[in-house]
Image: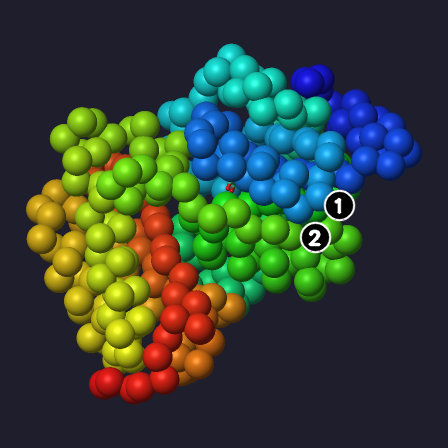
Amino acid sequence: MIAVHSIDETRAAVCTARVAGRVIGFVPTMGFLHEGHLSLIRVARENGADFIVVSIFVNPLQFGPSEDFEKYPRDAKRDREALEAASVDVLFLPPVEVMYPPGATTRVIVSEVADPLEGDRRPGHFAGVATVVAKLFNIVQPDLAVFGRKDAQQCSVIERMVRDLDVPVRLVFGETVREHDGLALSSRNSYLSKEQRALAPALHRALSAGADAISHGIHDVEAIEKLMRKMAAETPGIEVDYLAVVDPLTFRRPADFHHDVLVVGAVRIGKTRLIDNICIRKSAIPHAHIE
Ligand code: PAF
């Protein structure tokens, strides 16, 4: 593995690989890597990539002023070892001034799908994500790029951006990796104390209750959301931000249950904010309309 810090070095390494006929797979990350990130590298290979580029960049643009940019967990040495062990070819570690030189004021704004839920709670977040991902795509120019489904709205925002801007990349989404008790892996889980960690699976339990209701034919969105809130309330110490049933294309209430639907949630445990979701595939939704 080579570790590079500049755009030119990254482009040169990728160019050499492409000339040699390699298929470039890209996994953008903010580091503090866990099994979820490593699974995305495997997904890239399963989808035909044989030259893997991983970026680690804690993107200041996607953090609000009162968010955790400064204290976002970082462990460069451990990340590097994990990526070596995963036989990654290029690790791109750009400094902030490489990604955002003075005077860089252009932003990529995706509207509609980026507006509700996370977009509403975190103003500017998806503009930060879309801008950095667009830049990273222009730098790496991968054949395919892999993102984790845990950040479901992010996946939809990036999909929309790629479609709207005709970005020549194939997007692949990797399944969420969970702990034995259902907690989705996230770098932010490291903020949780032992006591808080014990509360955290309540988010997945609430979402599972919603997903079960949908796959048992209940299509009353308000009733499902109420059920999820009731489940979450069984765990004191969890503060619900939202628990919602949404259409994965719009992140608004589904017009009907004839397509895939998502149950999505965000909770706070102390100062830590966790998000998660479960997709209920169309094939798992009975046609009965129990209201
Ligand atoms: O999901 C993340 O880790 C980040 O939002 C991403 C896609 C690397 C952009 O900074």
Q: Amino acid at mark 2?
A: Arg
Nearer to us in this view, 225 or 278: 278
Q: Please, which residue is most extreme toward the right here? A: 19
- Residue 290 position in % (x across, y down): 24, 85
Disc 1 to disc 2, C-alpha distance: 6 Å
Say how many tags the image has.
2
Residue 132 visible to the viewer? no
| Mark 1 residue type | Asp
Judging from the image, what secondary structure is the residue with disc 1 in?
loop
Q: Quadrant of the C terminus?
A: bottom left
Residue 222 in picture, x, y percent from top left: 23, 75
Which quadrant holds residue 65? top left
Figure quadrant of residue 260: bottom left
Task: Name the residue carrying label 2.
Answer: 170
Tell whether 215 sits left or right of 252.
left
Determine whether, in the image, residue 285 is placed left or right of residue 205: right
Determine which of the numbered discs, if any, sits on residue 143 in the image: 1
Instruction: Say which mark, if any, is on residue 115.
Output: none
Residues at discs 1 and 2 in contact (Cβ within 8 Å): yes
Pinpoint residue 257: horizontal percent, then vertical percent: 39, 79
Frontmost residue, 101 versus 93: 93
Q: Residue at position x 27%, y 58% from top?
A: 207
Residue 154 picture location, percent across and down: 50, 52
Number of residues whose C-alpha sits closer than 10 Å to that of mark 2, classed few (under 14), some (14–19) or many (20 or more): some
Q: Earlier in the sequence, mark 1 or mark 2?
A: 1
Q: Is residue 272 above or below residue 261?
A: above
Q: Is residue 250 left or right of residue 41?
A: left
How many residues crowd mark 1 within 10 Å: few (<14), some (14–19), many (20+)? some
